[in-house]
Amino acid sequence: MENPPEETYGRASNPQRFADDRQHAFARWCVHQAWERARLVRSPWFRDRLAEMDAGHPAHPDFIASTHVRNRIDADPQIRLMVVGGDTDDMGEDEAIATTRVRQGVPVAYRGPDTDRDILNPQTQPPMLFHGHPGRITSPAIQHILVDWVGLEDESASFAVGYGPHTIDGGWAGPVVPALAEISEDEYLLRKQRIDKGERPIP
């Protein structure tokens, strides 16, 4: 089989065959793709860094001290952290809430599959915790986050079952809470209205 034309970037596995300028162009393309995929380009600070890279400027000092960049990612409200891959692939489009965004009263949605495991009263309506179910954080303790789920406020699903991030680096809290997604007040109200009408929160 013939190799791809020299003009393409198809030989990433053989970078020595690229001219220096093509290696640099390919590296810039990879950074753009990765940052767009991670949605870092929502932040003006990261967009500025891309412009500097494209103009051939040296790396920003914060990238040399990489913890500074990580702190920016954690603190910037325009960047929403999420888990990609692993056991959260089937959790839908709602992005996992960042641990730094967990606070009492924040509206969230349940990212897991439908479950009635923690619904003890057979008269409760709705009869289960739906995928996409809206609620509000009532206790932000990071290893046992409690949520008042709409219609399920008196069930153990709300007052007993807690959520938390995966642990990393010897017990530190991970960057996101995989089972919960932060949603807007408007989205919370829309999903609540659907549940009040006996519908699923997400059509």
Image: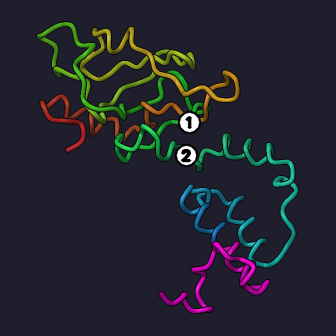
**6 in the magenta segment:** yes
The three-letter code of the residue at mark 1 reads Ala
* Tag of residue 98: 1
Find the magenta span and give its range: 1-29
> Which disc, if any, is residue 8?
none
Q: Is residue 86 magenta?
A: no
Relative to 179, 173 lies left or right: right
Nearer-the-camera pick, 65 or 203: 65
Dot 2: element: loop
In the image, residue 15 above or below residue 131: below
Label number found at residue 80: 2
Residue 74: x and y in percent read 66, 40
Q: Nearer the viewer, residue 103 or 7?
A: 7
Q: Out of 134 and 70, give the one closest to the viewer.
A: 70
Q: Going from the N terminus, do you reach mark 1 or mark 2 first?
A: 2
Could you give the CA–CA distance between mark 1 and mark 2, rounded to whole angstroms?
7 Å
Q: Residue 23 falls in which quadrant of the image?
A: bottom right
Residue 24 percent across, percent down from the top left = 75, 78
In the rendered structure, are the residues bearing label 1 and label 2 in contact, judged by CB atoms less than 8 Å apart? yes
Residue at left offset 30%, top offset 14%: 153
At label 1, counting other C-alpha atoms closer than 10 Å, the crowd grade (few under 14, some 14-19, many 20 or more) is: many
Asked whether, in this view, residue 57 is left or right of residue 42, the answer is right
